[in-house]
Amino acid sequence: MKNIVIEKSILKNNDESAARNRNILNDKGIYAINLIGSPGAGKTSVLEQIICNIKEKSHMAVIEGDLYTTKDAEKIERQGVNVVQLNTEGACHLDATMVGQALENIDTDDLDFLVIENVGNLVCPAEFDLCEDSKVLVMSVTEGHDKPLKYPAMFQKAETLILNKIDLIKYTNFDIDEFYKDVRSLNFNIHIFEISCTTGEGVQELCNYLQEKIARKKSGR
Ligand SMILES: Nc1nc2c(ncn2[C@@H]2O[C@H](COP(=O)(O)OP(=O)(O)OP(=O)(O)O)[C@@H](O)[C@H]2O)c(=O)[nH]1
Ligand SMILES: [Mg+2]
């Protein structure tokens, strides 16, 4: 596993770097998602479910963003997927320059699907385009149904919302009707999947949706 430690001096010119990254991915028809969400929402758990379902059908690679550790990347590597760790050394989000460095360490020739797990944070990652086709927001029911209106940028910029830990909803005061109403008021067209990484509920529907997106990008549609 490559482990790249980012220096603060290169955290600039984000959009130019994003455009360079995007050219590489678009040339090769690689579908890319940026997994964003609070610490502990379940980004890595969702990614593990996606890998189990998709890795035999599509060539995948993962870029793991974390402040300091390689814990998540080690989990992904154990699943047999090519992973590059980006340690931001305290920065609260990934930027496109960092992702460009990671891409230099990934063989993109045969790749269909790139997943970037961002640093756990419900605010900052929303502002930085990395090159992704889609921002996929992971939120869990244990975070509370009030989060869309409190952190609107994430919900406005995401194309897809994964409502995770649905197995725990009965133990919480999460008001799902209120949640849907608030999310739709911010982003009417967002695709919402209710899932549980523990029971597997909803995972197949999510993976079918991603597989369709991967196939479309590959065929240039
Ligand atoms: N009950 C339940 N627990 C879950 C589910 N998904 C994840 N978890 C647990 O939630 C905790 C956090 O999950 P992670 O996947 O590490 O969350 P993350 O968003 O990647 O966290 P960071 O990378 O630290 O931001 C772990 O203990 C998981 O086992 C779920 O659907 N149901
Ligand atoms: Mg994680």
Image (cartoon, rainbow, N blue to C red):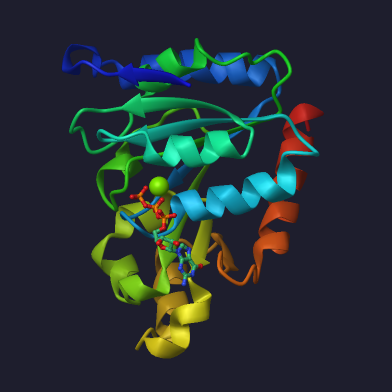
Using the image as rendered, state which of residue 74 and residue 23 is in the foreground: 74
Q: Is residue 42 at all visible to an observer of this figure?
A: yes
Report the residue at 70% width, 17% height from top: 28
Quadrant of residue 200 in the image?
Answer: bottom right
Q: As drawn, which residue projects farthest toward the front? A: 78
Report the residue at 72% width, 50% height from top: 53
Using the image as rendered, state which of residue 65 and residue 139 is in the foreground: 65
197 left or right of 203 in image: left
Looking at the image, is 173 positioned above or below residue 103? below
Quadrant of residue 114 in the image?
Answer: top right
Q: Is residue 15 at all visible to an observer of this figure?
A: no
* Residue 219 percent across, percent down from the top left: 82, 28
* Residue 130 percent across, percent down from the top left: 42, 28
Looking at the image, is 130 positioned above or below residue 214? above
* Residue 29 percent across, percent down from the top left: 71, 23
* Residue 26 percent across, percent down from the top left: 64, 20
Looking at the image, is 89 positioned above or below residue 45? above
Counting labels gives 0
Report the residue at 29% width, 15% height from top: 13
155 left or right of 123 in image: right
8 left or right of 107 in image: left
Report the residue at 35% width, 74% height from top: 142
Q: Quadrant for the C terminus, please.
A: top right
